[in-house]
Amino acid sequence: MFFVQAINSDVHRIWIATPYYIFDEAVGAGIKVYRYQPGFMHQKIVLIDTQAAAVGSANLDNRSLRLNFEIMALIVDQGFASRIEAMLLDDFRNAKLIEHGDCERVPSMRRLGMQTARLFAPIF
């Protein structure tokens, strides 16, 4: 799968914007996770270094990619990637960095929902 290969390749950075993500393990593994604050961010974008970006309708989970046949387009163009980077940097100004331990402060019913969502075998 493209996303797993991109993450495991020799790149400087990968930024993933997705509305649905189980963040506790990522934060524990040292990945910086930001939560958009003004409202619900519904972008589905993967920015790879400064050369490429994937955009589309897929929520980056097995259901979207295998059952719903949602897709993403990979655009390998430095100019396009630069515009995506600027857009995401603007979003980061309205986002809060999730710290290790924030997961424990999530209400128990929400944590239960997050753990239940893991049953749907996310890609990441």
Image: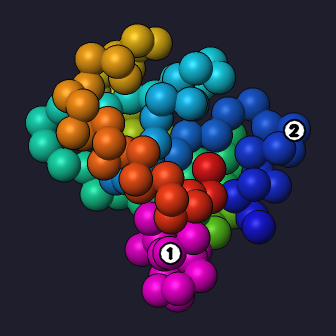
Question: Horizontal and vertical percent for residue 58?
Answer: 47, 71
Quarter assignment of residue 103: top left
Residue extent of the magenta highlight: 55-73
Does 115 appear above or below 1?
above
Q: Amino acid at mark 2?
A: Asp
Q: Which residue is mark 2?
A: 10
- SS class of the residue under badge 2? loop
Does 82 appear above or below 29?
below
Quarter assignment of residue 101: top left
Q: Which residue is mark 1?
A: 63
Q: In this rendering, would 44 be left or right of 66?
A: left
Q: Amino acid at mark 1?
A: Arg
Residue 61 magenta-highlighted: yes
- The answer to which of marks 1 and 2 sits earlier in the sequence is 2
Q: Residue furthest right?
A: 10
Q: Residue furthest left?
A: 38
Question: Horizontal and vertical percent for residue 4?
Answer: 75, 54
